[in-house]
Image (cartoon, grey):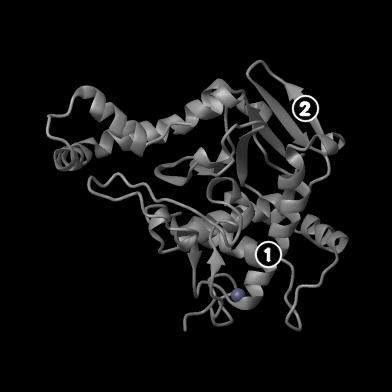
Amino acid sequence: MPLCSICHITEATQTGSHLLSAFMVESTIGKRGEEEGYIISAEANFDYRNNTGAAPIVEDYLFCRGCEQRMAYVENYVCTEYRDKLKKPGYKSNFRDVSKTEYIIREALNINYYALLLFICTVIFRISITKKELFAEFKLTADEEEKLRKIINEALPLYQNFKVKIKRNQFIREINEKAAIFDGLYFIMASYDELEDETISFNMAYPEYTHPYNFIFGQFILYFFFIKPRKNIPNLDFFNLMNELDIDLIYNGEGANIKTVMLKEGRWKEILNIPRQILVRKKIPGLMKKFLEEFAKNNKHKPTNDDWVKYIDDNFPEG
Ligand SMILES: [Zn+2]
């Protein structure tokens, strides 16, 4: 049995660890226990129609039971104080909106900066160490991975007598005292208020984009920096988002209130279309062959252009 990837002390006996926490992917794959998910790959003959459920984001023997519980504590905090309230009119007073023309900057007034950053660190660390196909191409550098591991191990609450029983206030106090270990980490987050069909989103990391790292997890786009974001430096930006926005207004760092860029529905859909178009383009040679074979089986006549377009639309539904 390997040792736990976080504490390096206890055996990694935990099974069924989620790489992305259930609440992050609920919008794309459904509630825990009822997940429906599909892997999309650029490989030409890849069959993306198998419902994989939650399997691509669940892995055994990465962590010990204690570290799993320690991460669950922070996840629970982020889920109840951030995710559950960010878009709910009933919690408007927990946030402050600054409106720009195409988007809103939503500043969180009641969320601990370091706890949310710690949660993000656990997610990025998890998808960096996984052997699962969905994130197989994503890897932090060894130094970055070790930096995050140390932060996570030091900042997560303690597991004692088979439980994590620290009170919320105490946890916040302790993590604030450890603020210095988070120095040098920055991030930008974006989401939306309204989306007609939330299941059309993706869970992806873009391995070739490392300064910053680019991710989309269900309803959140995340850019993660190991150096301070600077306006005049061109950033690698798969979603084509940062260059439109004023980086100085939207980045999160140094313990300031958490900001989330809330995009309009149309803009979010445009972003979802970027990976879709790339995948369709990469897959077309293999797909065309498969389409011709399937079409010949079911039809006597030759396919028209419209048949092909219909096939693409059926297999890559647009939002
Ligand atoms: Zn451990």
Determine contact: label 1, label 2, CB under 8 Å: no
Front-lying residue, 246 or 133: 133
Q: Which mark is residue 72?
A: 1
Q: Return the residue at label 2.
A: 97
Quarter of the image where ligand 1 sits: bottom right
Does residue 198 appear in the picture of this structure?
Answer: yes
Density class for disc 2 (Cα within 10 Å; few <14, some 14-19, many ≥20) is some
Name the residue rendered at 49%, 30% in the picture. Answer: 271
Secondary element at tag 2? strand
Measured as percent of width and height from the top left, residue 82 is found at 74, 46
Name the residue rendered at 34%, 34% in the picture. Answer: 278
Front-lying residue, 112 or 229: 112
Q: Does 60 sit above or below residue 27?
A: below
Front-lying residue, 271 or 208: 271
Q: Which mark is residue 279?
A: none
Front-lying residue, 172 or 263: 263
Name the residue rendered at 66%, 15% in the picture. Answer: 101
Marks 1 and 2, Cα distance to the nearest angstrom?
A: 29 Å
Of the two numbered discs 1 and 2 on the same chain, state the one appearing first in sequence: 1
> On the picture, is 40 further left or further right than 180?
left
Q: Does 150 sit above or below residue 104?
A: below
Name the residue rendered at 66%, 64% in the picture. Answer: 71
Does residue 222 appear in the picture of this structure?
Answer: no
The image quadrant of residue 174 is bottom right
> On the picture, is 271 further left or further right than 309?
right
Measured as percent of width and height from the top left, residue 36 is found at 49, 53
Q: Amino acid at mark 2?
A: Asp
Secondary element at tag 1? helix
User: Cβ of disc 1 within 8 Å of ligand 1?
Assistant: no
Q: Amino acid at mark 1?
A: Ala
